[in-house]
Image: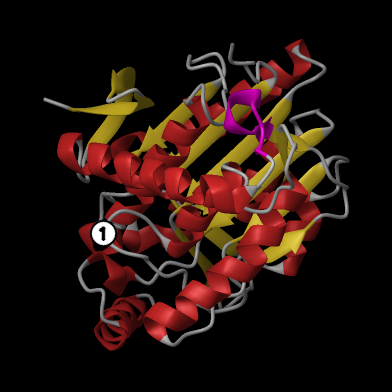
Amino acid sequence: MTKRFSQGYALLIGVGESAYKPLSLPVTVKDTQAVYAALIDPDLCAYPDDKEHIRVLNNEEATRSAILDGLKWLKEKAQADREATVLVYYSGHGWVDKTDGRYYLLQHDVKPSKLAASALSAEAFTDALRQIQCDRLLVVIDSCHAAGMATSKDAETAARIDAELLKEFEDFERTALSKGVIDAIKQVKGRVVFTSSEGDQVSWVKDDSCSVYTYHLLEALQGAANQPGDREVKVSNLMNHLSKAVPETARKLYGAEQTPHFDMDAGDFIIANLRGGKGLPDKGWEQVKPEASHKINQIAQNIKQHGKFNTIIEKVSNAQNFHIGDVNHKS
């Protein structure tokens, strides 16, 4: 019988379609849907599949107020459950204002003419995170996407499109979360912070299903860096796999550097069950790797079939004996 990871709570944010179309990043919605599917799968991470444990904000739902409300919801959950393990996952643009060094996450309803005033500032984001009083909180920020990757998988073309967009916002530049912001998040105990890249490196797209970073995160959640007999996935397991696999894939696909950053000063902790609590068999990851790859492909196919870009996850269905997040179109 599956052992539920009942102490797990997650807020997954994929900005996707921006109200200002040139800022749209459809792959970020696919990323959050894929992570959601893995989290609620009883044969994988085994988080309870209900709104008391997981909230997903995609496209027009990923507004500034909704993100802050979601963080407030996590605060309330952590207050009610002293054993809470919390995951905050953001996939979208992250820009810094070159005039004052302030960092912003660009949510759905950002106003291009008043970007600094309307975007979610790092200060507001970190203040909300600090209100979540728990001993185990993992923050994953995949915020260095090139805008050109929304329309082209060719690195040179994507870079040109990205440069044209940034010309429009000449006071801003795309960059990963800065050390100063990470340090601010860590002011409360129990915080571990992952970013998908460093500095101005691009967070690359693997294919039309998800980003390179998310693909390897899904592998790690299935035990890619665990040992035979392990029954849980720890944040150190995620780090060990992502630190090797992401740079290798970025070099292979694009001839580019993408170096994930990990700040684990708060120590290690369990983030999910491994294979529904069954754990890895005697031969370890190599034995289950084909099955894990198949599950990732099934997730991608389901999302592509039912949702594509402008979708939200509303319910869960069983498809071919695989439990994944179903997605429905809004009318």
Q: Taking 159 as reference, is 57 left or right?
A: right
Magenta span: 272-281
- On the image, the x and y values in percent for residue 9 come to 62, 25
Amino acid carrying mark 1 in the image: Asp
- On the image, the x and y values in percent for residue 219 come to 53, 50
Res 37 quadrant in image: top left
- On the image, the x and y values in percent for residue 293 come to 42, 50
- On the image, the x and y values in percent for residue 289 come to 51, 50
Q: Taking 33 as reference, is 196 left or right?
A: right
Q: Residue furthest left?
A: 331
For residue 15, say whether it is visible: no
Q: Please tell me whether residue 154 is drawn above or below residue 181 in the rendered image.
A: below
For residue 330, say whether it is visible: yes
Q: Residue at x 71, y 48 (%)?
A: 226
201 or 316: nearer the viewer:
316
Q: Residue at x 68, y 68 (%)?
A: 178
Q: Taking 290 as reference, is 4 left or right?
A: right
According to the image, label 1 marks what residue?
A: 208
Q: Residues within 10 Å of mark 1 (few under 14, many from 20)?
A: some
